[in-house]
Amino acid sequence: MAMMMSRGGSRVANTALLAAGARFLSTASATRALASESLLAAAKGFGAEVGAPKWASRTSLAYWVRAPSSVRNMSTLSLEEKQNDEKLVQPDSTSGNAGGNKDEKRVVSYWGIQASKVTKPDGTEWKWNCFMPWETYKSDLSIDLKKHHAPVTFMDKMAYWTVKALRFPTDIFFQRRYGCRAMMLETVAAVPGMVGGMLLHCKSLRRFEHSGGWIKALLEEAENERMHLMTFMEVAKPRWYERALMFAVQGVFFNAYFLGYLLSPKFAHRMVGYLEEEAIHSYTEFLKELDKGNIENVPAPAIAIDYWQLPPDSTLRDVVMVVRADEAHHRDVNHFASDIHYQGKELREAPAPIGYH
Ligand SMILES: [Fe+2]
Ligand SMILES: [Fe+2]
């Protein structure tokens, strides 16, 4: 009986949501919608009223609207309808080719899982599946790019010279092909955050203790680096031997970093700090080449304009500027993490810089 009531209740709720869905698709109704408690929950992270972190205020996210995309609740279909619908695979006319999947199809789901529909402030549809508006931000370009951690201890010097040594073959391989170089380096740069976050996650489970937000901070870094890659993929296409090289490099680097982080997170974070310092240098060289006209300053890819909330007429130069600022933030986070270990503490003892862009 209780189950029936709960099913009935959920149906009523679903019907109410679906009926409201059409209204929530435009920004014109956003104000009214946000006044509703139920939609506040759906619009989590959109504004100060719902306890958004401080970065949210910089991104004007109160204007984004998320709503159910379908007018049909699959859980209420008859078995026959479900069986028929499970066979249906229709082209998704609503989401275009965004999200990095050019052959995207919408699969009708028996489980009632529906993608949220999100609109921009101007009422146009949010076209990316790979990231959402509340994950976008305006880059802090005022960050000090010259900050450097002088290696003093033996371990720091080892981390510093390991990175310097890695730069040597990279320079020879890519020379002045900075677009390609950036793309390939981002495939490596996105690994440490994921490995560190994963190991801290496991440690948190093993020891029954909090992480101080560091799992999230490191996974955010990995995601940010991956977005750099998604951006540079639009301006430089990898050749077959570069793809092959990536397989080998990822296989070696992932495992080496995994072992390195297990043995000494202090060393691992210091090394990433120096890697980020090198990344800043590489992007500065990239900018010089753009300014000299050796690399064409093409319009910024659409994904970059949306991810970094750039003006619509932005160029590749603007993109390199924001990516370089990101690298400077990663440099700070990783040197900070290493410093915490140097002070004989665990990362969880110092609050993690979540949302530090
Ligand atoms: Fe990067
Ligand atoms: Fe980075």
Image (cartoon, rainbow, N blue to C red):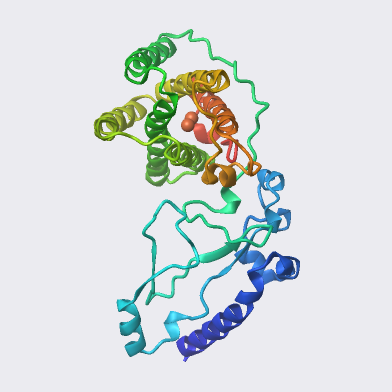
Q: Nearer the viewer, residue 272 or 196?
A: 272
Q: Is residue 63 left or right of residue 199?
A: right
Q: How many marks?
A: 0
Quadrant that contains the C terminus: top right
Q: What residue is at 39 percent from the left and 11 percent from the top?
A: 161
Tell me where residue 275 sits by quadrant: top left
Q: What residue is at 72 percent from the left and 70 percent from the top?
A: 29
Q: Nearer the viewer, residue 149 or 87?
A: 87
Tell me where residue 314 sits by quadrant: top right
| Residue 210 image position (x, y, % from top left) | 50, 44
| Residue 175 image position (x, y, % from top left) | 38, 17
Q: What residue is at 66 percent from the left and 43 percent from the top?
A: 55
Q: Is residue 233 above or below residue 293?
A: below
Residue reaching furthest bottom? 1
Q: Nearer the viewer, residue 48 or 327?
A: 327
| Residue 103 image position (x, y, % from top left) | 36, 59
Q: Is residue 279 above or below residue 36?
A: above
| Residue 313 image position (x, y, % from top left) | 64, 41
- Is there any visible trace of residue 51 in the rendered image? no
Tell me where residue 186 sits by quadrant: top left
Q: What residue is at 63 percent from the left and 55 percent from the top?
A: 45
- Is there any visible trace of residue 116 in the rendered image? yes
